[in-house]
Image (tube, rainbow, N blue to C red):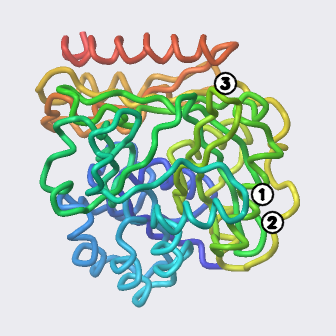
Amino acid sequence: MDRSLLIVGASARAAAQSAAAAGYAVAAVDQFVDVDLRAAAVHVRRCERFPYDVLRLERDLPTFDWLYVGGLENYPALVERLAARRRLLGNDGPTLRRVRDARVLAAWAQSVGLHVPEIADGQASIKLAEGWLWKRARSAAGLGVVAATSAAAGGDAFRRGCGYLQRRVPGVPCGGLFLGDGRAASLIGTARHLSVPAAGGSAPFRYGGSILTPTDEAGGADAWERIGQLLVEEFPLRGLFGVDAVVGDDGRLWLLEVNPRPTASVELFERWSGESLIARQIEVCRKGYAVDHRTVRDARSTPPPLGKQIVYSDRKDRMTPRVVERWLERRDTEGRPEVADISPAGTLIDRDQPLATVFACGRTVAETAAALDAAVRRLRDEFLNQGF
């Protein structure tokens, strides 16, 4: 079996580490080319104009099979062009066009009896009403999502109609991770989403991290498994995919959107299960076998509340060799990295840009959230003091 892989995405580090741990030679194209990505991959290319320069940058890389992570799901035409040159281990362009269309997804969900927030046209007069969100069509990681009454909704994307309105559902945001083979889906587990608003209110729902959460605290395994199976029957999803939802104040699970690729929470489930889920995606996409049996720890069991959080810088400065060295050395009691996505020394980190990712685990979700907050403060202090 071919043991090589190209990974393309806004941040390829976690998927590259997962594949490398499973014995794959990895090439990667992403926006950051962090130190820990370079350690996991044999070939790396930085795509500063992501994703527009992806096709140019991958041309001189070995002709490995490939998969994509966050960001490319919004560019089905690009996925198709790259898939014409390399074997794609993931969801194709036609699948992306349907499952990433909010109107198509909402209409289908209603037809099968799932709870889904009401969708309205992005230029509708309802834009001035309370309780609605405006979402940019090509949004990812919570970017391009604002309250419909916000002045930010009156920007160029709004005026061009490049988005839609969705009724806001009060509750707890969460996500489910699945492995699909185009016919059946297996629920791996659920996680609570954390948001870290951008400075100035430009991205109030920006993704900030995840904490593994038992399914009975996230809407229930039965509800999640039903969503996953119905999705795969309608949209032939293959490989790892995520479902964003809200456990509403009314106790119901509300479907928001589908991320048809490995999600940011994958590495938390890998820390729990001890296996490479990226390797599972490769196997499913290459072999096409059914996944209706348990292949990771049973989703109905209780995972520890492992968590991760993105640290956004509160100042503008450069990474120093001392900071890089200290963060690379930091390990938890299991010997796993406590800090990831570490930029090379000399990199200029602007204010409110990703600085690193931290990991923590407490006895409860609340304890983990508190531990993550403490870890974020510590990294910011070390960056401010240049590691000393």
* Quarter of the figure that contains the C terminus: top left
- Name the outermost residue toward the right: 293
Residue 316 in which image quadrant: top left
Q: Where's the N terminus, which quadrant?
A: bottom right
Where's residue 92, x and y in %?
51, 79
**Label located before the other in sequence (1 or 3):** 1
| Closer-to-camera residue (381/388) | 381
Point 79% across, 31% down: residue: 216
- Where residue 121 appears, as percent x and y from the top left, is 35, 59
**Residue drawn 27% across the image and 65% down it:** 51
Residue that protrudes farthest toward the front in the picture: 125
- Sort mark 2 into few (<14), some (14-19) or many (20+) by Cα contacts within 10 Å: some
Task: State which quadrant residue 320 falls in.
Answer: top left
At mark 2, the secondary structure is loop
Q: Which residue is denoted by mark 3 in the rendering?
A: 305
Tag 1: residue type?
A: Ser
Amino acid at pointer 2: Val
Pointer 1 with pointer 2, Cβ within 8 A: yes
SS for tag 3? loop
For label 1, the residue is 186
Question: Earlier along the polypeptide chain: callout 3 or callout 2?
Answer: 2
The residue singled out by tag 2 in the image is 291
Whichever of callouts 1 and 2 sits on the residue coming sooner in the sequence is: 1
Mark pair 1, 3: CA separation: 21 Å
Within 10 Å of disc 3 (Cα), the crowding (few <14, some 14-19, many 20+) is many
How many residues crowd around disc 1 within 10 Å: few (fewer than 14), some, or many (20 or more)? Answer: many
Q: How many marks can you see?
A: 3
